[in-house]
Image: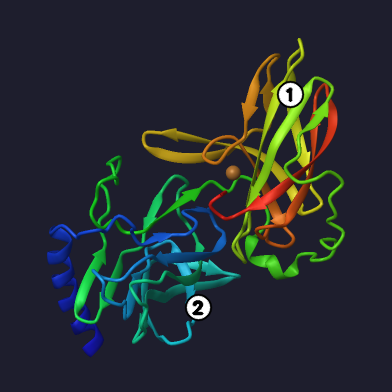
Amino acid sequence: MKTIKTFGKTLGLAALLSATAIAGSEAHVTFLDREATQDSTILATLQVPHGCDGKATTEVRVKLPEGFVFAKPQPKAGWELEVIKGDYQKTYDNHGDKVKTGAIEIRWKNGNLSDDFYDTFVIQGKVSGVEAGTSLAFPVTQMCGDTVTAWDQVAKEGGDAHGMKSPAPLLKVAAGEDHGHDHDDMADMDMSGMAGMGAAAAAGETVKAGDLEISGGFAKAMLPGQPVGGGFFTVKNNGQADDRLISVSSPAAGEVQIHEMVTKDNVMRMRQLKDGIAIAAGATVKLEPGSLHLMFQKVKTPFKQGDTVPVTLTFEKAGKVDLVLQVLSAQGK
Ligand SMILES: [Cu+2]
């Protein structure tokens, strides 16, 4: 029980530290991908951008919130791994088994991450029983020898997380509308057919179809194991008549949905647009991160930066249009 005792002491010290200003803490410890879909198994990837005021990071502790279950850390060369198990507040179903306990905290210990370097710490887990729109907080304790930084501040509901000195990394849970299927079963998916993902048109090129002009197509790189991908482009209607994007398909995904993100009461939610997107006469409609987007479901091979993703857009009037999306980084840059 020595670890637990040490941890209690650490927390005390951490609370003290987080009450004082931490100089130069602009780059917080955050998740690489800050959104997860309900009931999906994800790789929660923590980014540690720097040490503690010049000192190297030697230990990273992550507390797992209720609703992030069946967690497994990714081992890292040069670090010892400790998984602290405990009781969940609820009981979770794991392929028919009732599970009441599991990892509640992960510690990467006795490492040495120079202040000059950046690194990531990955935990695989399932988001389960969490209401859409909820943000899960993963309090992190970053230790640099005996210097401790606690990334544990959580905004009150509806409160503003901006301006906090050391916010806990948050994972926003989005609705999983389509989820009649289970994202856990990635291994069962058909991995063939990706080799033939050749591009007819050049990626990112402007395509014209009737009165429509479609440009700036891109997709975001996905992390391995991440079940869904996002796609974006701009449609300009140069005509006199309204049109409508009614459906999208792609050989790279089992299904492509049209989604929108809406922020209501400070909570960002994602919903499927079953009626598609209206492209009014003379209008320019932009699909972009945080707003309208394509959501690739049942993706066969995670999109990698530099890849291309062919899509076929179906418009009410302009008909079918082939477009090639250029895969950019996971941040969409
Ligand atoms: Cu979406």
The x, y position of residue 143, in whole percent, is 26, 76
Q: Write down the quadrant of residue 59 in the picture.
A: bottom left
Residue 155 x, y percent position in the rendering: 27, 48
Q: Position of residue 15 (x, y in %)?
A: 16, 65
Side (left or right) of 332 relative to 85: right
Q: Secondary structure at mark 2?
A: loop
Position of 147 relative to 209 (above/below): below
Q: Which of the pair 115/111 is nearer the observer? A: 115
Task: Give the side of residue 78 with respect to residue 86, left or right.
Answer: right
Question: Residue lying furthest top in this view?
Answer: 240
Q: In the picture shown, does residue 176 fall above or below 6?
A: above
Q: Secondary structure at mark 1?
A: strand
Q: Which residue is mark 2?
A: 74
Front one among 156 and 69: 156
Give left or right: position of 113 versus 310.
Answer: left
Crowd class of label 2 (few under 14; some 14 to 19; many from 20; radius 10 Å): some
Residue 215 visible in the current orientation: yes
Q: Amino acid at mark 1?
A: Arg
The numbered mark, 2 or 1, whose residue comes first in the sequence reads 2
| Label drawn at residue 226 | none
Residue corresponding to mark 1 = 244
Q: Are marks 2 and 1 in contact (CB under 8 Å)?
A: no
How many angstroms separate mark 2 from mark 1 (CA)?
44 Å
Figure quadrant of the N terminus:
bottom left
Residue drawn at 47 percent across, 77 percent down: 73
Q: Amino acid at mark 2?
A: Gln
